[in-house]
Amino acid sequence: MSKSQTYIELDDTYGAHNYHPLDVVVEHAEGVWVYDVDGNKYLDCLAAYSAVNQGHCHPKILEAAQSQMGRVTLTSRAFRNDQMGPFLKTLCDMTGYEMALPMNTGAEAVESAIKLIRKWGYQIKEIPQDKAEIIVCDGNFQGRTVTIIGFSSEDQYKEDFGPFTPGFVNIPYGDTDALRAAINENTAAFMLEPIQGEGGVIVPPEGYLKEAYDICKENNVLFVADEIQTGFGRTGKMFACDHEDVKADMTIIGKALSGGFYPVSGVLGSKEILGLLRPGDHGSTFGGNPLGAAIGQAALKALDGEGMVQNSYDLGEYFKGRLSRIESDHIKEVRGKGLFIGVELHGPARRFCEALQDKGILCKETHENVIRFAPPLVITKDEIDWALSHIEPVLMEN
Ligand SMILES: *Cc1c(COP(=O)(O)O)cnc(C)c1O
């Protein structure tokens, strides 16, 4: 039995089966490369769903994490610490927001944004109590809590998990007429992913974000962007909304905010919105903890100081261009922005992902028929060329 097989059996015996992973057992990783317990080497083209944009085990983030671990890791928000403030200042300076609410996982940040939206709706927009509505899009993926799955359009995410939280209205993605029609006097916000990642790397029509934003402004509705997956350079700009010069009223962040070292998430917004929270309204034992803050600070500095966002833009264009030129009957469409690329096939993508694994490339199918290529943003052109030398023949196979 291979070493991998031993671990796979342990996983399957003792772990709940809520995932269907590729059978590669990773032991260590560095930059864009991961190594399994049997000594095989792979190019990571998923980057932990864009949580390791900075590359695996980035040395500067590692140093910050190790050093902070020996000082203090958790104070709880009952006391202050010397890491949270400087981290949030860097975050706000880099993103142009006034305030941030630090949390841990993406789903928690989305839940926090929903609470902020509602509070703004009642206190500022003066929506009658318990009537606030949030418009969301079909095909969304924003996390796995009961409230969040309640507005998913994916049956499997919801099956046998009800009843759900009311107050959400679904409309088709990319359709501004539907947005206009769905808004009423009780609408507090329109919340969306600027590119739907789990939905299949769905890029909305050009101009959609700007038009949707303008519609929100005309109607005193908050425009809230979930950039947990698209943020921090993934699409070739700091945020995917930047492609259309839209500054969301609130931006929800997570994943690459920590470079994959630790769960760090948050909500960015104005004083008018985030300032509505008073002591006791909301909280988290780990949110804003000094270890996460030190890691977040280093992760932001690595992203900013090492040209990763521009690299994503430049190499994303190159990678997408080369993928678009593959003449395979399997390919229906190649789409994406920056190093966030989806190759939609006419049939299931899983077997192509398995074939790529055999060639030393890790990627994962999303939404059944789509292969997502989203490597760490530190990837080089040579590494992309190497990947393409395997991707091309695999996609040409029968
Ligand atoms: C991953 C993701 C989330 C949820 O983040 P978790 O850390 O898994 O809770 C929410 N929104 C989007 C767009 C995501 O990609």
Image (cartoon, helix red, strand yellow):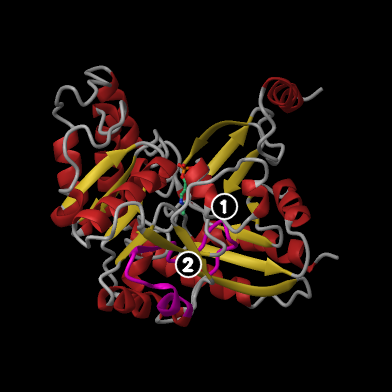
Above-or-below relation of 284 to 306: above
Instruction: From the top left corner, tell me how far across and down residue 160 is, in percent.
Output: 67, 41
Amino acid marked by disc 1: Cys
Tell me the SS state at disc 1.
Answer: loop
Task: Identify the residue shown where x is 25% and y is 52%.
Answer: 268
Please indicate, yes or no, whether residue 316 appears anywhere in the rendered image. Answer: yes
Q: Residue at x 64, y 67 (%)?
A: 343
Image point 26% across, 17% down: which residue? 70
- Please tell me how crowded label 2 is: few (under 14), some (14-19), or many (20+) other residues with Cα within 10 Å: many
Q: How many marks?
A: 2
Residue 366 lies in the magenta stretch: no
- Say above or below: 329 vs 351: below
Provide residue 320's location: percent of width, then percent of height.
55, 71
Q: From the viewer's perspective, tell me whether residue 277 is left or right of residue 360.
A: left
Amino acid type of the residue that numbered disc 2 sits on in the rendered structure: Gly
Query: Which quadrant holds the C terminus?
Result: bottom right
Q: Height in image: 333 above or below 25?
A: below
Q: Nearer the viewer, residue 147 or 302?
A: 147
* Mark 1: C-beta under 8 Å from nearest atom of ligand 1: no
Q: Is residue 231 above or below residue 293?
A: below
The residue tagged 2 is 316
187 is within the stretch colored magenta: yes
In the rendered structure, the answer to whether residue 320 lies left or right of residue 262 reads right
The residue lying furthest to the right in this view is 398
* Span highlighted in magenta in the image: 178-202
SS under mark 2: helix
Residue 284 picture location, percent across and down = 31, 30
Is residue 82 shown left or right of residue 226?
A: left
Task: Using residue 325 as the reference point, say whether residue 283 is left or right of it.
Answer: left
Tag on residue 45?
Answer: 1
List x then y, in percent, for residue 207.
40, 81
- The circle drawn on residue 181 is none
